[in-house]
Amino acid sequence: MNFLQGCFSTETKNIEDYKYAVIYTNMFEKAVIHLYNEKGKFLSKHKTKYRGMPLGAFMERPIHMNNKVYYANPQSKYNTNEFILELNKSNLQIKEIPNEEKIAPTVWTVDKEFAYMSEGDLTSSKLAKTNIATGKQVASTKFKGEANYMIEHSDKLFYTLQSR
């Protein structure tokens, strides 16, 4: 299954054996997921309750692992969102992964167990670590410097900050 950029209320009862999913999204309208088969034939569309799914975060593409796709939408319409989204590719259910620090994640990543979310101004950044399964924040800290990027690799978190 391939996901192209672009929760859940479906116009069809079943999720067919799709090959491609296209997410149509913008900041003001709720995203809609269109499913297509291997030949590109439209199968169905599924409405979500989320706006701007991959538009607001400073990521080149969403993260995918364990049959899930992770997106951030730190702002939709005129609202700040303090979570990242986990889209289950098998049933198209979307789960919010929150943080207690009220971070609208503009810099974020996930590993098999945790979601890491950060935001900040030009001089300081907050970082929160949330257990994906429980949705409970397990740690947080603050740093001097503007958060630019983070990546998880081999159970290590690499977090770049720009000092001013």
Image (cartoon, rainbow, N blue to C red):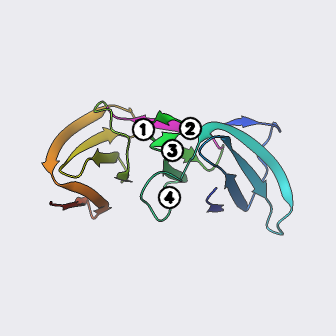
For label 2, the SS is loop
Compare residues 65 and 102 and report the one nearer the observer: 102
Query: How many numbered marks, from 0 up?
Result: 4
Residue 77 marker: 2
Q: Sort mark 3 into few (<14), some (14-19) or many (20+) by Cα contacts within 10 Å.
A: many
For label 4, the SS is loop
For label 3, the SS is strand
* Residue tagged 4: 62
* Residue tagged 1: 83
Amino acid at circle 3: Glu
Spatial CA span between label 3 and label 1: 10 Å
Question: On the picture, is 10 further left or further right than 75?
Answer: right
Q: In the rendering, at what x and y percent does residue 142 appear?
A: 16, 43
Q: Sort mark 2 into few (<14), some (14-19) or many (20+) by Cα contacts within 10 Å.
A: few
In this rendering, which labeled residue sits more in front, label 3 or label 1?
A: 1
Q: In the rendering, at what x and y percent does residue 99 appear?
A: 34, 34
Circles 3 and 1 in contact, beta carbons < 8 Å: no
* Residue tagged 3: 86
In this rendering, which labeled residue sits more in front, label 4 or label 2?
A: 2
Q: Is residue 143 above or below residue 130?
A: below
Q: In the rendering, at what x and y percent does residue 81 appear?
A: 45, 36
Question: On the picture, is 150 further left or further right than 59?
Answer: left
In this picture, which residue range is highlighted in magenta? 92-99
Quarter of the image that includes the N terminus: bottom right
